[in-house]
Amino acid sequence: MSPAPETRAPEARDMSPRVVLWSAAVLVASVAVALGIVAGLVHLLGHGRGPTPVTAPPPVAGVPLDEVPYLGGAQVRARAKADLTRYGWADRDAGRATIPIDRAMDLLARKGWPAPDDKDTEAPE
């Protein structure tokens, strides 16, 4: 049978409670002073100005990013949906046509991705 472990009483004095209380008080006071300084600066520097007015950015020279900038969002979405759901010629001379996106995905799912032709690997003009 092994001897019972030796039980030791906790140390009588780890740290003075007075030091812990003073440290906590100094910490709380420091945080309060810092918050007071920040509040004072916000009040002095931001008082009476109100919100900054929002202005439109200056126009950028060059081609606009929107294909049709005067159309609203609903009209742009309707036009995009029409482009994705119609048959037509992309380039009649080259024999390239557009087909609805659902039909294209169905064809790719059944047949797989086509191997690139020599003319497909050329850099676009």
Image (cartoon, rainbow, N blue to C red):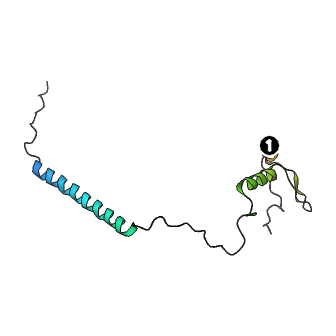
Judged from this view, the residue extending furthest toward the bottom is 61
Camera sees residue 11: yes
Which one is in front, 90 or 52?
Answer: 52
Residue at x 81% of width, y 53% of height: 83
Q: Which of 28 and 89 is in front in this view?
A: 28
Residue found at the far right of this picture: 93
**At label 1, which amino acid type do we have?**
Asp
Residue 15 visible within the image: no
Secondary structure of the residue carrying numbered label 1? helix
Tell me where residue 27 sits by quadrant. Answer: bottom left
Tag 1 residue: 106
User: Can you say whether 50 is above or below 24 in the image?
Assistant: below
Instruction: Judge left or right: residue 14 versus residue 86.
Output: left
Q: How many labels does the image show?
A: 1
Residue 90 rendering spot, x and y as whole percentages: 86, 59
Residue 105, image x and y in percent? 78, 45
Front residue of this view, candidates 54 and 87: 54
Query: Residue at coordinates 10% horizontally, 50% vertically from top-left?
Result: 18
- Residue 14: x and y, percent? 11, 46
Along the horizontal axis of the image, is 34 left or right of 117? left
Q: State the quadrant of the N terminus.
A: top left
Considering every residue shown, the one lying at the far front of the view is 48
- Is 3 drawn above or below residue 45 in the view shown? above
Q: Is residue 113 above or below residue 1?
A: below
Residue at the image position 71 percent from the left and 74 percent from the top: 62
> For this view, does 49 lie left or right of residue 14?
right
User: Going by the picture, which residue comes out furthest to the top?
Assistant: 1
Q: Viewed as shown, does residue 100 lie left or right of 24?
A: right
Q: Give the quarter of the figure containing the C terminus.
A: bottom right
Q: Residue 110: where, in percent of width, then height? A: 80, 41
